[in-house]
Amino acid sequence: MLRGIAASQGIAQAKVYKLEQPVLDIVRRSADPDEELAKLDAALTRTAADITRIREAASVQLNSAELAVFDAHLMMIDDPEFRAQIENTIRNDKVCAEYAAKQTAEMMVMIFEGMDDAYMRERAADVKDVTFRLLCNLCGMEIPNPAMLDEPVIIVARDLTPSDTASLNRQFVRGFVTETGGRTSHSAIMARSLEIPAVVGVKGILEATRNGMPLILDGRDGIVIPDPSEEQVSAYALKADAFRKEREALKALKDKPSVTADGRKVVLSGNIGSPADLESVLESGAESIGLFRTEFLYMQCENDFPDEEMQFEAYRSVLEGMHGRRVVIRTLDIGGDKKLNYYSFEEEMNPFLGVRAVRFCLLRKDIFRTQLRALLRASVYGKLSIMFPMIATVEEFREAKKCCDEARAELIAEGIPVSDDVEVGCMIEVPAAAVNADRLAKYADFFSIGTNDLIQYAMAADRTSEPLSYLYQPLNPAVLRLIKMTVEGAHKYGRWCGMCGEMAGDELTAPVLLGLGLDEFSMSAPSVLSVRQMIGTLRYADMQQLAADVLECDTDAEAAELLKKAVGKQPQTVVQ
């Protein structure tokens, strides 16, 4: 039995699928040219077949524009000139095919990366992708591809990138376990949104497992059991059944309002990463969408930023699907640990404090303008609220809002309808913005607090750092004071204040947030009903006093203990 961090609720039992990229150790080796050319042709054929198979699997959930990258990869692998360059190296230098292919690939990457045109420079990523697959086939090494799964598995990996997690096939991925990461890592957040049980930070899991081994994952208690006994299998089957019944019982609250025992009404919203998540939000009983993470639209593209039409269709589908209920869409939030295959960021000493989110958008207004146009075009199909992330100053917010106003004027001049009822708000995740909330509220229509980043910046502790995980302290007095200042700053000007960070869906922290006057709680869809149930048992007046008491605590641990004694921590709903 191994222990880690419970990242996404649920229990899963399935075979292990280890997601590890092969490590290639290619050295120059003399070889017979004819034999190596035969090996090269076989590998080229297999690589083309691999790409074709992946394209067919991806066609179920990607549109023709997104599938174009696979067509480009096929053209490259079938290009006679590409093969001819490798053949020349094999014949002239009498070396093995894998070394010749590696040399050819490195030369091509260097050429592309040295081009003046940004689009052509970004094609280097395509060359790397295709040639890595070719080299693996030449070396007889398998590349794991969870998109091609055809049976239930639990993914085991050192880590999963946000794009890895977003592309998981929920039909067959029962859960995932990683060696690294924490509860607020993006992969963990996406797992909760996708309703995939997960345990992260499990030391030694890669060494302790092999492909095909049976595994039990307990995402509630952070337990992983490789090669379980029959008794353990039976015991966890019973636990999983109990969890399903608990979740089923909560469905009675689906269409109920979110109201405290003494009549205080709040809004419970859902977080989504793509239009595909809309169904789970509607099923959860969420009253609106409090966060649409648009960066995952960008991550799903392979060779360029999504164009205006593609984005418009995504935003329109969500707005229409919510039938007039509010949808808060966050503008592009990349940088830090969120990268794009087709765009190279400048090297920075600390990318989490660098050019990311709205800072990137204000530097690349061409990209920002495309998104704003798509959002405003979609605004006539529902109740849209636009939110800018990573705002630190009043000047940044005013500049971003000016870009939005310019896009609106541009569309109207073109005769394209735009709603005149679009809220433009500010995500509060930088301590300076929280301290200055009463100034920002003069210009913003609403606030939404992003606690994952707010906590890491307040504590000066990278939330992806395992040694510093102890500094992820949602109930630290400094963090709570920043939240209090944000809520009060919003209310001073009659603005509503929500929260879309992990605290909003945590049943331990939600009571103190209620007492601080938070108007909206946005969370992973599976948490909505359990939080609604808990709120219905609380009195707002009592929670106001409790919040005041918690603010007097000296430490996160003291605050947590006070909350447990006052309201208890109810079991969370489990995702199965």
Image (cartoon, rainbow, N blue to C red):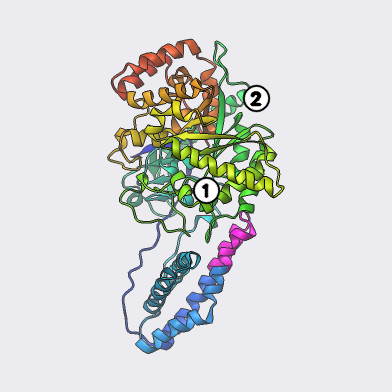
Which portion, as a residue range, is magenta? 49-71
377 sits left or right of 484 in the view: right
Q: CA distance from mark 2 to mark 1?
A: 29 Å
Residue type highlighted by circle 1: Phe
Residue 212: tell me if it is visible. Answer: yes
Residue 35 picture location, percent across and down: 42, 85
Which is nearer the eye, 68 or 519? 519
SS at mark 1? Answer: helix
Which is nearer the eye, 266 or 21? 266
Q: Residue at x 64, y 60 (%)?
A: 64
Give the image quarter of residue 31. Answer: bottom left
**Dot 1 corresponds to which residue?**
296
- Using the image, tell me which numbered label, if any, was put on residue 255: 2
**Is 381 included in the stretch rendered in magenta?**
no
Which is nearer the eye, 206 or 259? 259
Residue 153 picture location, percent across and down: 49, 49
The 10 Å Cα crowd at callout 2, few under 14, some 14 to 19, many 20 or more, is few
The 10 Å Cα crowd at callout 1, few under 14, some 14 to 19, many 20 or more, is many
Dot 2 or dot 1: first in sequence order is: 2
Query: Magenta residues: mostly which secondary structure?
Result: helix
Q: Residue at x 54, y 71 (%)?
A: 48
Quarter containing the N terminus: top left
Q: Are marks 2 and 1 in contact (CB under 8 Å)?
A: no
Taking 536 as reference, is 47 above or below it? below
Give the image quarter of residue 250. Answer: top right
**Is 52 included in the stretch rendered in magenta?**
yes
Residue type highlighted by circle 2: Asp
